[in-house]
Amino acid sequence: MNSFNVRKLLAERVSLMASSEIRELLKITEGRKVISLAGGLPDPQTFPKDELKGIISKILQEKGDKALQYSPTKGIGELRGELINFLNSRGVTVGDEDDIIVTTGSQQALHIIALTLINPNDYVVMELPSYLGAINAFRLSAPNFIGIPLDDDGMNVSLLEVRLRRLYGEGKKVKLVYTIPIAHNPAGVTMSLDRRKYLIELADRYDFLIVEDDPYSSFTYEPSDTTSLKNLDRSNRVVYISTLSKILSPGLRIGWIVAHNELVNVFERCKQSLDLHTSTFAQYVSSEAIKTGIVKSVIEKARAIYKRKKDVMLEALEKYAVPGCWWSKPVGGLFVMLRLPREDLNTSSMLFRAIDAGVAYVPGNSFYIDGSGVNTMRLNFSFPKEDEIAEGVKILSSVIKSYLNA
Amino acid sequence: MNSFNVRKLLAERVSLMASSEIRELLKITEGRKVISLAGGLPDPQTFPKDELKGIISKILQEKGDKALQYSPTKGIGELRGELINFLNSRGVTVGDEDDIIVTTGSQQALHIIALTLINPNDYVVMELPSYLGAINAFRLSAPNFIGIPLDDDGMNVSLLEVRLRRLYGEGKKVKLVYTIPIAHNPAGVTMSLDRRKYLIELADRYDFLIVEDDPYSSFTYEPSDTTSLKNLDRSNRVVYISTLSKILSPGLRIGWIVAHNELVNVFERCKQSLDLHTSTFAQYVSSEAIKTGIVKSVIEKARAIYKRKKDVMLEALEKYAVPGCWWSKPVGGLFVMLRLPREDLNTSSMLFRAIDAGVAYVPGNSFYIDGSGVNTMRLNFSFPKEDEIAEGVKILSSVIKSYLNA
């Protein structure tokens, strides 16, 4: 820049935006022969390319003038209607079309929630660990994060109650609790039904909102109760968000929020300034894909693929086990968490070594709002091929071994 | 809501979000026989439906796995490359792909600029009138707006200098100036080349950024110099934004920002939290549409259609002229501004009457950050059919006449 300093011009809130160190580091994998267990991408085998070709031709033929035009900020009526049908089939009941707004991926849902509901210094509860995209989106509103650990039954709700009581004793109030109750990313656990009910009770008692993020409930690998918090809620405290990214295509960027219509109206006002509306074309495609059963068959196909890949990863972890390491046995979702034996071990510093040896992962620290998790990592099994998963875990094992001995 | 109050939960910044009174009012036109001169929609005749069907089949066939997948936050390389070619053909020189980021419509470009560059109370210069979407996006960062009037040669840059000098005398500093130099929305004027050069000089002298919004430079109806501020800029002070909405399809939501790569990197960090990335699929479609010349032919077709429609509107305004009313003779773009004879006349209060009579417009007040323009309105000629334009203006004339006599 010739004559002036860019940094001087930036708004103060830029310092709240996620730095991209890890992403920069992972960029060096591009063009190298590295097996990436770092992403969260769906397997392209699940993309219904031929089916989409058919419905897109039909859309352009029959409704091209509408599908290529501006459209309402809340989303087109057709898609909101189809989403309600789809959610019903998932066991999530939606009042009517006024209770749902289409977003540009569920990332935008998180951003809208951050802008409309979180004031600086508001208390916001996040799970330990939690979804990185939510942490980053909420951080922009500079809240006070409170971390509540997970165990095999999901968020430790009793501990949450202890924290709530203490805060209330100090005259403080929690604004919202963010949770991924079913098939958690990255932890791979599902909150027990009892805890789900208890959380709803606490929300009523301590007067907070619950943001229920549900990207993975189509991918549970063991029979389990997946009743949504939304359906347990009797006082409209649950803001439910989800996405078609894993069950149709992330490249279409279709997410949505279900909430009380008064909140949805505020979300609409906000979204108006963010991008006017989500791609009309992608909305028509998604609407047809739900209506014609394409989404249903993607889910069935993908669930089988991911269950098999999950088994391949767990078998490899068993086979190449490093003494003292712990890893999750996910009941759903796309990820395994792995923890190194000691807390002084740092998966961020080990990453460069791993990439050099031919495998990449996401250091777990980024998923913990309290700075913990430095000796954990997240491994993805949905995108890599089965032989890559086995090979990647094998390489990872030897990297860990040499790191432990260094 | 059963047990709690939604308003109590909202973040304070919700009060900065545009209220939707006018949009609500315009919603009552739905399902009624009302000629709408209120929107800013392209004519669907210009949508290249058959051509898109062809390129979409090819994309799904040849690159479906990539086109349906997650993609980089900055935008796919193919599209950034094609946008650079396209901008070159428009006379806007872009250094390289690191200087450009794809956004979800140019509305998201404005939101990103608001989040990354504007602090509360920063001085931000807007034209009087200016684009409503920019006003709404920037307002979210709570700046101090400074309004500079337009005349037939665009922004009154001498007046800007007077204001700058006064502010600097008070130890204050302008952060950025937002302008639509070519074929202004809603004013229909183009900033003279001399003023464009002068504005660049002032930016260097008083150390501010210029946000150059350029959605309409493909639609000028008289031969004129359309050299961009970006090309006149020697010190990387210009942040250039544009869109494919009017020259391919608004339903794809493809916009972009060209700026110095250090700024683009900050925009990327910001966009990461907003929606991860813009629809990959829409990006592949857009990239092919530029490469194969579809965008070029849409521009030629649309320019001819809009020029004719503009003439139809001006002829109707002449034919049904109301004594004392003034209206713009747009040199480009999609809009005519109309002003009622007296400043105590209010086009917002007249709107209900107009809709009742069968015609809708946007009250001009919303385009003025200083609260003026209450007796103005914006009329769109790109979307309505030619006979609707003539009929709409005829109805409007009689509404104005009866309003003046009331």
Image: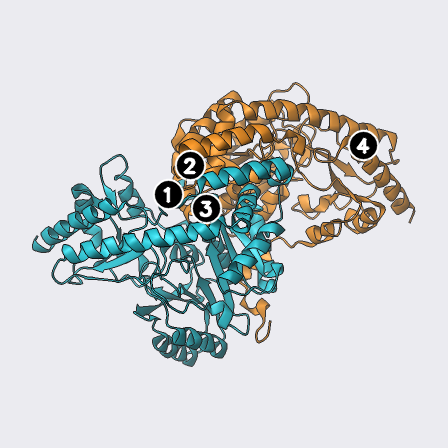
Chain colours: A cyan, B orange
Which residue is the extreme one toward the right?
B405
Which amino acid type corresponds to the residue marked 1 in the rendered image? Pro
Return the x and y of residue A312 as percentages of the image width and height.
24, 53
Image position of B71 with respect to A131: above or below:
above
Q: CA distance from mark 3 to mark 1?
A: 34 Å
Label 1: how many Cα within 10 Å (few below 14, some 14–19, many 20+): some
Q: Quadrant of residue B244?
A: top right
Q: Which residue is mark 3?
A: B116
Which amino acid type corresponds to the residue marked 4 in the rendered image? Asp
- Location of the N terminus of chain A by quadrant is top left
Q: Is residue A112 left or right of residue B270?
A: right
Q: Which residue is mark 1?
A: A44
Q: Which residue is mark 2?
A: B64
Which of discs 1 and 4 lies nearer the camera? The answer is 1
Which amino acid type corresponds to the residue marked 2 in the rendered image? Gly
Return the x and y of residue A341 as percentages of the image width and height.
15, 62
Q: Which residue is mark 4?
A: B387
Q: Is residue A277 left or right of residue A166?
A: right
The numbered mark 2 sits on a residue in which chain? B
Asked if disc 1 and disc 4 are in contact, CB closer than 8 Å, the reply is no
Label 4: how many Cα within 10 Å (few below 14, some 14–19, many 20+): few
Q: CA distance from mark 1 to mark 2?
A: 9 Å
Which of discs 2 and 3 lies nearer the camera? The answer is 2
Look at 80% across and 45% down and name the residue there. B33
Helix, strand or loop for disc 3: helix
Image position of B88 with respect to A116: above or below:
above
Asked if disc 2 and disc 3 are in contact, CB closer than 8 Å, the reply is no
Q: CA distance from mark 2 to mark 3?
A: 34 Å
Helix, strand or loop for disc 2: helix
The numbered mark 1 sits on a residue in which chain? A
Q: Earlier in the sequence, mark 4 or mark 2?
A: 2
Q: CA distance from mark 4 to mark 3?
A: 45 Å
